[in-house]
Image: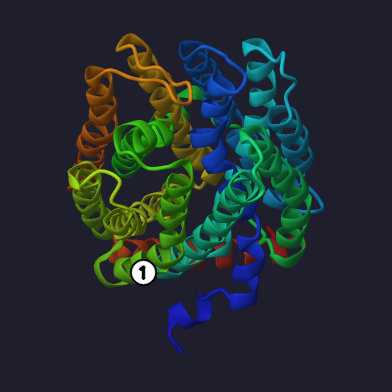
Amino acid sequence: MTEAARTRIPARTVAAFSMSAVVAGALTTPLTVYLPNFYASHLGLKLSAVGAVFLAVKLLDIVFDPLAGGVMDRTRTRVGRYRFWLLAAAPVLMLGGWRVFFPDKSAGAAYLGAWLFVLYVGYSLLILSQSAWGAVLARDYDDRSRVYAWAHVVGVTGALAVLVLPSLITTVGGKDQAAGVAAMGWFIVLAAPATILIAALGTPERLTPKPRAPANWREVVGLFRRPSMLRLIACDFALSFGPGFTAPLYLFFFHQARGYTAGQSNVLLMIYIVAGVVGAPAWAAIAFRVGKHRALMAATGLYAVAQVAAVLLPKASFLLMAPAMFFAGFVANAFVFLVRAMVADVGDEVRLETGRDRTGLLYAFVASTMKIGSALAVGVTYTILSRIGFDPRPGAANTPEAIAGLEACYVGVPVVLVLAGGAALFGYQLDARRHAEIRAQLDARDAAEAAADAGRGLSPR
């Protein structure tokens, strides 16, 4: 039996672990597409105010991520390290989701900012604990691609479910946008405790080295500046900021610029998301053959092609746009899970060289870059639309210049940024061969330390 076969995580464990991604996936589309639009168009907040609130909250949340990641690295409880924080995320998500998705009509920028921050704290706890737990759960280079890919697929099903609900309510039920947003809220509030509990009870948590002293600022800077981690941070920022530009503009772009109805736009977005069910396992298989960083670089080039197609196809041509959106979703779904799988490899490299487990802190770095990118996207795009005179109200007549500016934001900026993200991985050294060497040395050292502890009558690490 090969080493890969011995370390391959059973399918039932992967399935249970992946359930923790349902709510994370379900929150992605509302936070980037629907909620900014809802608070601007339905509740009447100014575009610039909505953009500023989302930017400010995400910047605050970015400060929270490294603190939470550092605490997770030092946590040791009877229920485990990452299991504890995953369970803690559920009530925070429920409270924040209830207040953000069910606002009073008088809710203003202060209300949105306060409760959006609570929701993002729960989201951070969920993402950080789930990502770091995956790194401990799967130790093999290729098996990590598999575990994170299937967690991503389950996250896609959550995103799809939360997208189908408002479509059914607004298209079939004849309800307004507020009813669709409320349906998303109900899904998140009810799914959070159920799916997190399944993941917590069904996933084993491997014993890890005893917690060390907290990382000081010098060590944090050192981790950030590691060549492998610095490339991943730069790549992740570009791959978040670029596609992040399209999310808050999606409904405006497809309605006002391309002439699609609200129902057609929702279906196209659904097609884009469904593509992830096929895309994530396919890219995991590609990564198995060529390596994770090479697969990610190839995906960035194909994304540029897909993005340009969105503006070159004839307007209101649903039959042509549908396969184009599927291809775009297929490609874009490589970004998040491959970066997360690569961070797990860096975590092993750090532990071998320093003797310290900083997995939570490393995932906090990429969580922060992802949030910076998406936060800047909302703040920058809505500010630009406001400056060029774009009117977000349903049925508003916009000038050709405003529409041209909208199209430039939706297509041009993401292409440049995503290609830059792929370029950041040129020269990346932590491939399958190097990771196998690291893993062999770690396993030998862990076994020796466990034997020494047993000889002294100490509890296992």
- Count up the numbered dots: 1
The residue at 63%/38% (across/down) is 123
> Which residue lies under the disc numbered 1?
282
The residue at 27%/25% (across/down) is 403
The residue at 65%/55% (across/down) is 20
Please state the horizontal and vertical placement of residue 197, each as a whole percent of the image. 77, 56
Residue 135 at least partly seen = no
SS class, disc 1: helix
Amino acid found under the numbered disc labelled 1: Ala
Quadrant in the rendering for residue 212? top right
The residue at 43%/47% (across/down) is 350
In the rendered view, would you say 386 is above or below 185? above
In the rendered view, would you say 219 is above or below 449? above
Q: Nearer the viewer, residue 175 or 210?
A: 175
Q: Nearer the viewer, residue 87 or 97?
A: 97
Task: Give the farthest residue toward the right.
Answer: 78
Residue 163 placement, left or right of 83: left
Residue 37 placement, left or right of 13: left
Quarter of the image where the C terminus is located: bottom right
In the rendered view, would you say 384 is above or below 437? above
